[in-house]
Amino acid sequence: MFDIASKMNENEYFALDWASKVQAKAELTAEDVEMSQEIDVWAKEIGNGIRPVIELSAYLTKVTQPIYANAPFELLENFFEFSNVGEFDNFEEIEDAKNTLQAFEAARAVGNVDRTFIDYRSAAPTWKHIQLETEVTLEKLRKGGYKTVAELTAFAEEAMRNKMFQMIMNVVDALIVSGDNYGTGALSETTVDAIVDYLNDYSNEGMILGTSARINEIRKLVPATLLSDGMKETLNRQGGLPFYRGVGFIGIPRTAKLADGTMPVPVNTVYGIAGKVGEIINRGDMRVLSSQDNNSEKIHLKFTGMEFGVVIRHPENLFKHLIQ
């Protein structure tokens, strides 16, 4: 018999990867096929009342927990550090030192100059909580079997991941409303160069992030006269460049759109990111609770306990351009 628990202990993403492949109608490995067969029998037994519905919520908790605990979307890991605290633990604020010391010209060994001091800033997180509720009918479990379980898992994972990303970017967006790392106006060659110049002052691994439509606009603005022959070939072949002057372009595709029609990042804004900007603290563990309505033969599922804090320690590593 195929041992699902052992596979998930070996690889915590095994069941999640399986669900994604089933939902996408991708080619399945021999192990994936065995997984489908085991889940199919198990799901139909729940649908027929042979197994308790709590088994479904326990399975979903096990499968989707890594989404929250380990944030398996690599993009955020490029500019945030991740840590974890217990559900009832308090996050210890950490002081960040900013160099505000000033040196003055002075006469040799005579008199004094004004004293200046190091600026110690205390960084406290902005706490957010995500919750998702849905239901599945017993008939759907009996009829769809493993496909229903895979669909439910993949859709819940996608919805929670994209919502978490959107909430984090909302914190970033609200932070920058003025200053030399804030710009407004239409996208132009001058705009792109200003963002790139700023990012290159702070990091040699900067990136510009936005919706794929906005990033495609930026790619088209890169002056062709500045491109090498290899870059021109890439431009002709792909219709755009992956980077410009050492700064990468990251586009969020339309397929990442949330169920309410919004994108994980605002459509009228692009962000420049120069290295690590802060920290994301995951607090506690995600839980999936279930209750059965025997009259309507439905299972109510509640995904909760997904709490995280966002700390921006280095706002100077961010650039925001509002497109008007």
Image (cartoon, helix red, strand yellow):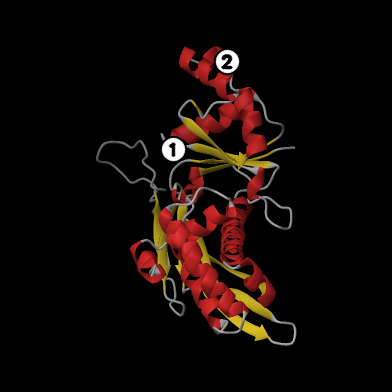
Nearest to the observer: residue 244 or residue 115: 244
Q: Picture quarter containing residue 250?
A: top right
State which mark lies toward you, 2 or 1.
2
Where disc 1 sits, the SS reads: helix
Residue sitting at x 59%, y 29%: 192
Across and down, in percent, residue 238 comes to: 57, 25
Where disc 2 sits, the SS reads: helix
- The residue type indicated by label 2 comes to Ala
Residue sitting at x 44%, y 62%: 34
Task: List the residue tagged with mark 2.
Answer: 224
Residue 157 vs 50, above or below: the answer is: above
- The residue type indicated by label 1 comes to Tyr
Q: Quadrant location of the N terminus? A: bottom left
Nearest to the observer: residue 1 or residue 98: 1
Cα distance between the residues tagged 2 and 1: 25 Å
Q: Earlier in the sequence, mark 2 or mark 1?
A: 1
Neighbor class of circle 2 (other Cα within 10 Å; few <14, some 14-19, many 20+) is few
Across and down, in percent, residue 101 comes to: 38, 47
Residue 125 seen by the camera:
no
Say whether marks 2 and 1 touch (CB < 8 Å). Answer: no
Task: List the residue tagged with mark 1.
Answer: 202
Across and down, in percent, residue 201 comes to: 45, 33
Q: Picture quarter containing residue 133?
A: bottom right
Residue sitting at x 67%, y 36%: 213
Residue 309 seen by the camera:
yes
Nearest to the observer: residue 208 or residue 236: 236
Nearest to the observer: residue 284 or residue 63: 63
Across and down, in percent, residue 259 comes to: 71, 57
Neighbor class of circle 1 (other Cα within 10 Å; few <14, some 14-19, many 20+) is some
Residue 321 vs 38, above or below: the answer is: above
Residue 274 vs 290, above or below: the answer is: above
